[in-house]
Amino acid sequence: MNLLEPYHQTYTYDTGNNLTSLSHQANSGDWQQTLTIHSNNNRGTETQQSTN
């Protein structure tokens, strides 16, 4: 069994350079994490993760 495999990650940022999403693609499975940024203080307020 091989525990390492190639993967590709894509990052998305808003206009304030805050990370808003991370997508991970690999043969073993894909997932995406979405981050919500609070508009008043520029801090992360919520994270959601989904798998494909």
Image: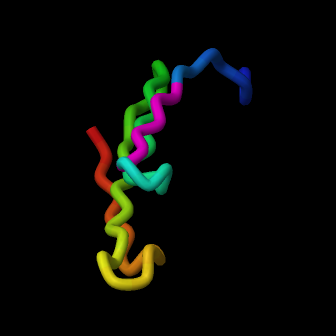
Residue 1 visible, this orientation: no
Question: Residue at the location (46% across, 29% down)?
Answer: 10
| Quadrant occupied by the N terminus | top right
| Quadrant occupied by the C terminus | top left
Residue 42 placement: quadrant: bottom left
Question: Residue at the location (72% across, 29% down)?
Answer: 3
Residue 4 placement: quadrant: top right
Residue 52 vs 27, above or below: the answer is below
Residue 44 visible, this orientation: yes
Check residue 12 for magenta coloring. Answer: yes
> What is the basis of the colouring in this image?
rainbow
- Residue 23 location (% of width, % of height): 41, 37
- Residue 14 location (% of width, % of height): 36, 49
Of residues 32 and 6, the one drawn nearer to the viewer in this rendering: 32
Check residue 49 for magenta coloring. Answer: no
Point out the stretch of residues depicted in magenta. 9-14
Of residues 3 and 43, the one drawn nearer to the viewer in this rendering: 43
Question: Residue at the location (44% across, 26% down)?
Answer: 25
Dominant secondary structure of the residues highlighted in magenta in the image: strand
Residue 40 vs 25, above or below: the answer is below
- Residue 27 location (% of width, % of height): 46, 19
Question: Residue at the location (65% across, 19% down)?
Answer: 5
- Residue 17 location (% of width, % of height): 49, 50
Horizontal placement of 23 versus 3: left or right?
left
How many dots with numbers?
0
